[in-house]
Image: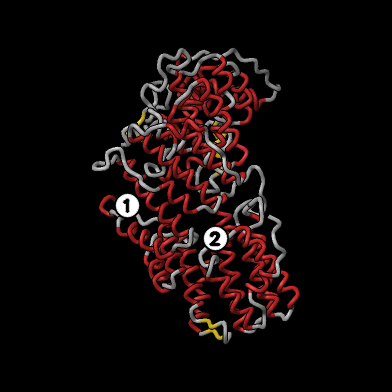
Amino acid sequence: MTVLSIQNRGFGCLPNNPVTGPASCRTASSSSYIGNGTQSLNGTRERFERATNHFPFAAELLEISTMWGGNALPSMMYGRASAPRKRWNSQGEIEEVYLEDGMGFQLDGTYNAIEYLKTANLLILDSNEDGYEKLSVDKNLQQYLKERLLDSDLLRTRSLMLMCHLFPGNKEIEPFQRGVLGRLHLQPFQSVVEYIPKLLEKKLLSTRQQHEVIGTLLESSTFSDRNWKFKALELADAMLVTAPCDLLETYAAIRRKAVHRLVVGTIWKEPSHLLERLATCPISNFLYWKWRLSRAEDCVHRDDFDAAVREVFGYAAINPTKPSTLEYLLGKEVRFEHARFVYLSGRFEDAKILLDQELKAINYERSEKLHDSLVTYLAGVNCETGNTKEAVRLTKAVLADSKEHSRSHVSLAEAYLHDGMTYCDPPTLFMDECARKKFSEAKIICEAVLQRYRSMPNFDTISGHDNIAKVDRINYLRVTTIMARISFIEVIFGGGDLSAALNSWVAVFNAIEKCGWSEQGFMEGISHLTMGAIYRCLDNTTESELHVKTALNLLNGAGRRHLIVGLGAIWPEFTEEVRLRKGGRLTAVLNAELPKSKS
């Protein structure tokens, strides 16, 4: 849910504001621009002045584009600025929002204006390498317009409010815009944010406009620039001091909790007064339960899965007999998250019942879809409970419309891995030919996914400005562990070179590092446990037991996790059997030899 869906956007979004109004009425400062004497600069200025006279709207579009930063502006923005957007109203239903007259773009004239400016070399095709055309204002013209419009508070306001209107809304309403426009719009939005302090100082933003800006700031914090996430939250919090709003304050708390948990790895304690707020309408009820879901994720971060289940227990709509559209969707989300938390706690039989209920509850007549996340956990719970063929059948059945790198494809690879393992016998180190076929199918999927990730720019670096979402880094780790487990099995059971198995688990360590977790824990423990089994197969008892004890130290502290299918129980048992078959000592014996904790 985006905060753009929370606000009463569009109800006279610019009321009685002296700086708003038709663009043709604005007064820009006289130009202080002095050209460098070259024909290029003068020619650019002449072309702009000609556009001002012959196609005024095209000139307005150039000015707005310059205020948006002037560079790499997605062309789809311009059409969207001419059209209404969708959002949730206070009753939890979808409605359309229009920009105030004079603030948006002319629907019929936008395309013609862009073509005119491209022909005049004032708006230039920047790139379309990712499939989305981006436009940039001529560099000379940018310099001229920035100086010409230096004191134009009206244009600053218009640029800011347009960008707030352009930013994407809820993924249930506009899934394409949510995924694409948010990423493409982030840089232009960051350009207009610098206007906010001066506009506030001059009292040029109404309360409603301020709420619009706060909402967009919070929404922008969901995208992948790590440093921006905190800056956006700080700006929103500062604006909420002078333009308070209970709904926005609650949403800000939800976003801050998420950012601290996902980026910093810490739990942010929300203000106590949030606990006392009551849900009085569908939109506030929605926010209340979103906040409860956020608290539940904090519990998961602490590995307190029972507390997470308690946080989401008892969800109800304001009117349970006739829930709003928004509350209906939220109810599905809460029930799925409840099942997920039960799964993560290791209660797989209970989780299977809950997940099967969600599968049966999909209303295809309402155009509801079977989402990757539900498929992932259904496949996972069937693997964990030994129903590996059902996991394969389920995932293969839903892949017709999926992309090669989808989560469902990775779930199929996990299902193939675990189905293949049923054809392996650790005590005899025998592997049936069926296992080889299953592993081969899994590797084909994983290699395609890994290639996609490795082709991403800067995937091997982690910085403050990180364009790779954490979910992608974790999925990369997930795929890497599948490949590493298969490598271990094929080498051990097939009599191959053990260095290949060692190298595959070194790759797992590297993938763990890419996730940016602040402390070593479960994943490092599982990796050391596997390395211990590999060294036991190399008859290196000292190195083997060193790795196993390192693993036990980590696992005793972190506990067993089920974030990646099979690693919590199936894989440790499998490696233990292999290690014992090669003459290793029981894990329980090695655990007893660990130094006792002083606590």
Q: Which amino acid does label 2 sit on?
A: Arg
Which residue is at 28% across, 55% downward?
364
Residue 490 location in percent, x, y? 59, 79
Q: How crowded is mark 1: few (under 14 residues within 10 Å), some or many (20 or more)?
A: few
Which residue is more in the foreground, 26 or 122?
A: 26
Q: What residue type is labelled 1?
A: Glu
Under circle 1, the secondary element is loop
Residue 368: which disc? 1
Residue 144 location in percent, x, y? 62, 22
Which residue is at 54% across, 28% downward?
237
Quadrant in which the N terminus appears: top left
Which residue is more in the foreground, 167 or 56?
A: 167
- Residue that extends furthest to the front in the rendered view of this protein: 599
Q: Image quarter for residue 280?
A: top left
Residue 507 location in percent, x, y? 66, 64
Quadrant in which the C terminus appears: bottom right
Q: Which of marks 1 and 2 is in front?
A: 2
Residue 383: which disc? none
Which residue is at 68% across, 72% downward?
590
Which residue is more in the foreground, 246 or 364?
A: 246
Q: Distance between the residues labelled 1 and 2?
A: 31 Å
